[in-house]
Amino acid sequence: MRRNVIPKITTHPIGKRRHNTTTTITIQKEQEIKKKIDSILFLSPTLWPEPNSSAAGVRTTQLLCHFANTVGVSHVSYGSGANLPSSSSSSRSSNNATKEAAHHTMQHLTSQYNISFLHIPPNNAALIQSSLASSLLPNDDNDNEAKKKNIVIFDRFFAEEAYSFHIRKHHPSTLRVLDMQDMHSLRAARSDLVQSFRHGQQPPPFTHTKTKMTQAFMKEIMTYIPSSSSSSSFSSSKVSLKSQDIFLREMASIHRSDVILVCSPYEKYLLQYVYNVPSFKLVLAPFFTTPVPHMHTTSTSSSSS
């Protein structure tokens, strides 16, 4: 089955309701995986990988390196709807600095890992189809695509929304993987609850009245579980319609995908036991960065005269 193509990534120890930063990543049946996977295509409608701009950028860059180097698939590529960045801009703005950093990151990934980068705007069906044909095995009548497996990894649920129907239409046997990065509906709802408390525990839209956070309300924030209903609890009445919409979109994207990469053990627990997402679809895949060794520093003070 297609779910056996993706490498099984496990972490130890795993807690159901708490984050654990100590992880050991193990790849099982690596030689078997190498024989099955031909190409992996990452897709994002708006971003290029840039590890210095955000934690998501770190994780995406390390995922690219992991699949290109450790797993040893034939080809890894990354497509984005954003314009290809360059280092030729004379402007000193933060936006251009980010683009220049992304350009250098992409150059490094190409030279060291042979990763290719494609401009694939999500609203251009013809260009998407041609880009897929160059990145994945083409569909044809003699079923060549079934001989080797291809994987598309969507960088968050809005990438899945933008591109997945093209994958299903032109490459139906391709494994569709959703990299959640965060559970965005949980993050958005918690943000709403914090803002609600800061502005007098009122439902959105918020006023400018601010109050002090209490331990009881912090517990309410941390135990809140997103849902599509605004009347399921007192907390839900404080969550904006936008956050509820994010929940529905994210859940739909999860159910459309074959495999889900989840960062947090708690989020994996919610998906499996609260939202009833089949466990075989969920892969706990936290940060892939190399741990930074503990650094000992000594301070010296100049002697007084």
Image (cartoon, rainbow, N blue to C red):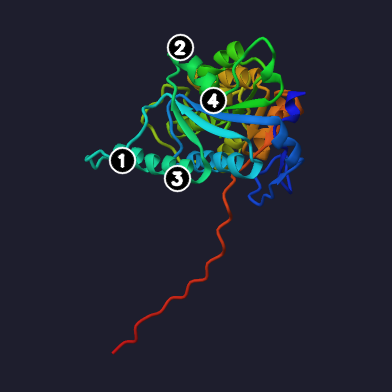
Q: Position of residue 36 (x, y in %)?
A: 71, 31
Give the labeled residue for mark 4. 135
Measured in 3D between alpha carbons, the distance from the residue under mark 2 to the one under mark 4, in whole angstroms, is 14 Å
Give the labeled residue for mark 2. 126
Residue type at mark 1: give it: Ser
Counting residues from the N terminus, which is met first, the one under dot 1 or under dot 3? 1
Give the secondary structure at mark 1: loop
- Which mark is drawn over residue 87? 1
Q: Position of residue 149 (x, y in %)?
A: 68, 26
Counting residues from the N terminus, which is met first, the one under dot 4 or under dot 3? 3
Q: Residues within 10 Å of mark 3 (few under 14, many from 20)?
A: few
Q: Residue at x 71, y 20 (%)?
A: 146
Outermost residue toward the front?
142
Q: Nearer the viewer, residue 61 or 14?
A: 61
Q: Position of residue 179 (x, y in %)?
A: 59, 31
Q: Is residue 52 visible?
A: yes
